[in-house]
Image (cartoon, grey):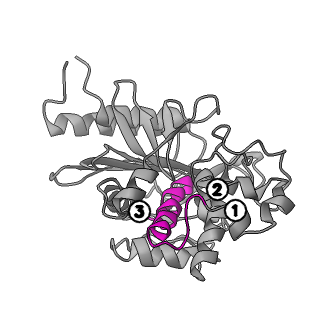
Amino acid sequence: MSVFSTRPVLLGRIQRALDRAVADGGGPGVVAELVDGHATPWFGTAGVADTATGRQRGPGEHFRIGSFTKAFTGTVVLQLAAEGKLTLDGTVAEWLPGVVEEHLGADGTKITIRRLLNHTSGLPDAVLGQPVPPPEEPGRRFIYSKVNYSLAGMIVEHATGTSLADEIERRIARPLSLTGTYLPTTEKTIRAPHARHYSTSDQTGQDADIHDVTEIDVAWAGAAGGMVSTTSDLHRFLRALLDGRLLPPAQQKEMFTTVPTEGADWVPNTGYGLGVYSQKLSCGVTLWGGGGYIQGSMSYAMGDREGSRVLVSNLNGDWNDFLRTFTDLFETAFCPAAS
């Protein structure tokens, strides 16, 4: 089997994958940052941060991370479990009496916190307060659903008496010095520096011409997908999560115990844990982390199980083929080179 002979060869291949990501209108701009053992972190970019000025993308930019927010929410829940402030077998009915019954027509006594975090609650993908289809039997199968993490975020706030944003800041961002990572509450802007975010859909999800969505209200995404971060911050967070610095062993084991996702029309070759998922690449390598898709921004952060090699990437547009683009990039970075 042929492997990468030198780091420059690997980095050159990753750069070409970035170029492919934005070729032929695939997106405005893309960035990627690789941390590989003790080597100096590498940062690559292609395309632009601002289509009006042609400004290039660069390190330190803030961007919306979408569903990778779930990894932060899951970490906070598991820390609370380690402190005895809740249990993963506790039910939604105990913490949020009547909420899923009233809004979703479900039985909260059958939905545990663990089932919220691994998406086996039976609840449909929805935003609380909007019309939804009937729920399924809890525990039967994996259904990826934003509402699971909206509920988990509400439980955190009930258990702590403070906001989820404050808990993420106190428990994760501040200890790890994640100075560019936060969960906005009423903010519609993204803190500087940042790339402009572009979309081909309007706020209702209907098709639209490419337009700037840098300043929009994404408070609805909250615990399920509302956070902002940077490539270097996501590196520090994911590496700390993978190497066990954020959770005691029992909760670490819970987070990385997965349920199968086959048949759910979701990311192929994955198993979902409690806020993170595993993904098996075509070469047989298994990575851990997550991705995020939200209006104007697509992100992916994955590493090996020990956190020795981690790659974080963001594209500041939402019309690219999400899975194809990031699969190409991560297989380039983690699979042995072809002969």
Residue type for callout 2: Thr
> Quick check: 19 left or right of 81?
left
**How far apart are labels 3 and 1 at the CA level?**
33 Å
Question: Which callout, 1 or 2, points at the residue further toward the start of the chain?
Answer: 1
Residue 213 in picture, x, y percent from top left? 64, 60
Question: Disc 1 vs disc 2: Cβ atoms closer than 8 Å?
Answer: yes
Q: Secondary structure at mark 2?
A: loop
User: Is there CB contact under 8 Å for labels 2 and 3?
Assistant: no
Instruction: Tell me the distance, in whole angstroms, between the alpha carbons under discs 1 and 2.
Output: 6 Å
Q: Residue at x 45, y 52 (%)?
A: 254
Query: Could you say which disc has been placed on residue 112 in the image?
Result: 2
What type of secondary structure mainly makes up the magenta span?
helix
Q: Read off the residue under disc 1.
A: 92
Tell me where residue 160 appears, x and y as whole percent: 56, 79
Residue at position x 40%, y 51% in the image: 253
Q: Which mark is residue 230?
A: 3
State the residue in front, 95 or 329: 95
